[in-house]
Image (cartoon, grey):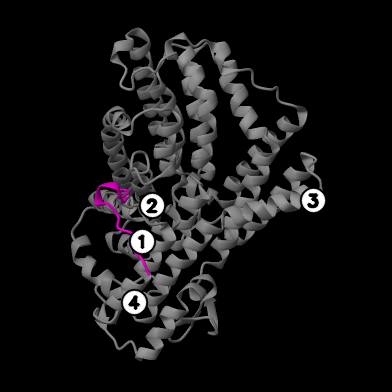
Amino acid sequence: MSTTATDPGTEEPQHKRKFTFPSALTILAIVTVAVWLLAFLIPSGAYDRNDEGAPVEGSYHRVDSGQTFIDRLNDLFLAPVNGLYGIQDEKSGVVGPDMAGELYGSAGVFLFVLAIGAFITVVFATGALDRGIGRLAHRLRERGAMLIAGVMLVFSVLGTVEGFAEETLGFYGLIVPLMLALGYDRMVAVGAIILGAGIGVLCSTVNPFATGVASSAADISLGDGIVLRFAMWIVLTAVTIAYVIRYARRVQKNPERSLSGFLPGDREQTAADAGEVPELTRLHKAVLVLVALVFAFMIFSVVPWASALTGDADAKPYGFELGWSFPQLAALFLCAAVLVGVVARMGEQRLSSTITQGAADFISPALVIVLARGVTVIMNNSKVTDTVLHSIEGVVKGTSSGLFAIIVFVVNLPLAFLIPSTSGHATLAMPILAPLADFAGVSRSVVVTAWQAASGWMNLWVPTTAVTIGGVALAKVGYDKYLRFVWPLLAILFVLICAFVALGAALT
């Protein structure tokens, strides 16, 4: 048996494994185990509840959870199952898959996410939305400010109604050449795309993946607080568009002030370099009209019109109000997906496979919601949720409603970084934050608005989101340069958000 000596100088260098941020599913799995272990250390307790199920301030008292180690181990094992279709027993309050009572799991939201995933995928498969945005950009290719405002407004509208974010990555190949042809730099394209969609998501009015999930976890309607969120969307969108246009004009007037600089050939590009975008066909126009009608009807179906128009939260609903929730909305988007496919003449085979693929593509955020709900089941069954509430109750006491809303916004900033999934973040945080709003005398809808603003604000710049990192990479702009560009806007938005949530809290 012979051996061969290896010269140390000729050894191949070992590459260090690059750290990658864990996925939302991995983070929630770790959180599940951590919360399960902490439940052994946190004392069990409970609040008395009023007729609406809200905790009564000052009524907290210690109770025995009544759980054995085997019971707790079973809760850990069944956490994802309970997170989907766990039933809460009416007498004991314990959640389990074989109990009798009300649904505690997030099956309704789970199916809704899959349904809207199918709908969005079918819409994109028709090519109507991509081509519509492309036509808008091409028509405005010689009017710089209008191009920036038009693109950002469309992205913002899509962001506020359906969480349009990752889908923007496909538009860099069109928008970057157009901006360069108008005498701008690549940073203008980055700002128009990332900030346009991002500000819409930040000010989500009915975005199902942010407002929808958070409202469900807070046990309120998707339409609650829509007036505040709509006003916030108008103001913050206008400010963001003005910020990008101001920078664009500065670069156009003096290219030396560009933060991103110019690559070889950037200054020689013309409008023709962006390429011609195909015309919209009648089918494409029909699909776009149908998509607009579907989202308009969704908004109509969830808004509590009597409360929104009178300002009285207890106003008797008008006769035309539908008061729809997630089961009806899931059915709406499934039917709409089929209708879009029929209008676009996709054919039975292609439509079926596209709907299936759409649901599959959105299974990840749907599972995140289930896992996060499973964590709350563990806390509920071990009776530690109210103990956590009680530990924070003292902080809320004596705090003005406006300050409370700002605190909710600020507290959620680091949580948004640690839990990059908006759906998972909402499902985890709302069971704690919503009852705190009751103690502070603030509407739960304000808490939802403050939470989603924190999540949206962080996602405008954190390096853990594909929208930001992928966007600057596609535009060939350094991430450090993007941070230099965006930080003044972040400061402005921070102040405006605090003002809006404080005002919303004061008005409620």
Tag 1: amino acid: Ala
Residue drawn at 54 percent across, 61 percent down: 109
Vertical order, 491 against 69 (above or below): above
Q: Is residue 444 left or right of residue 301?
A: left
| Residue to which mark 2 is pinned | 420
| Residue to which mark 1 is pinned | 429
Which of the marked residues, 4 or 1, is nearer the chain's N terminus?
4
Q: Secondary structure at mark 4?
A: helix
How packed is label 4: few (under 14 Cα within 10 Å), some, or many (20 or more)?
A: many
Q: Are marks 1 and 2 in contact (CB under 8 Å)?
A: no
Q: Secondary structure at mark 3?
A: helix
Question: Magenta span: helix, strand or loop, mainly?
Answer: loop
Residue drawn at 42 percent across, 58 percent down: 24
Which of the marked residues, 3 or 2, is nearer the chain's N terminus?
3
Magenta stretch, residue numbers: 1-14
For the residues marked 4 and 2, what is the alpha-carbon distance in whole angstroms?
22 Å
Query: Is residue 494 located in the magenta-colored stretch of the structure?
Result: no
Vertical order, 129 against 329 (above or below): above
Residue drawn at 45 percent across, 80 percent down: 77
| Residue to which mark 3 is pinned | 349
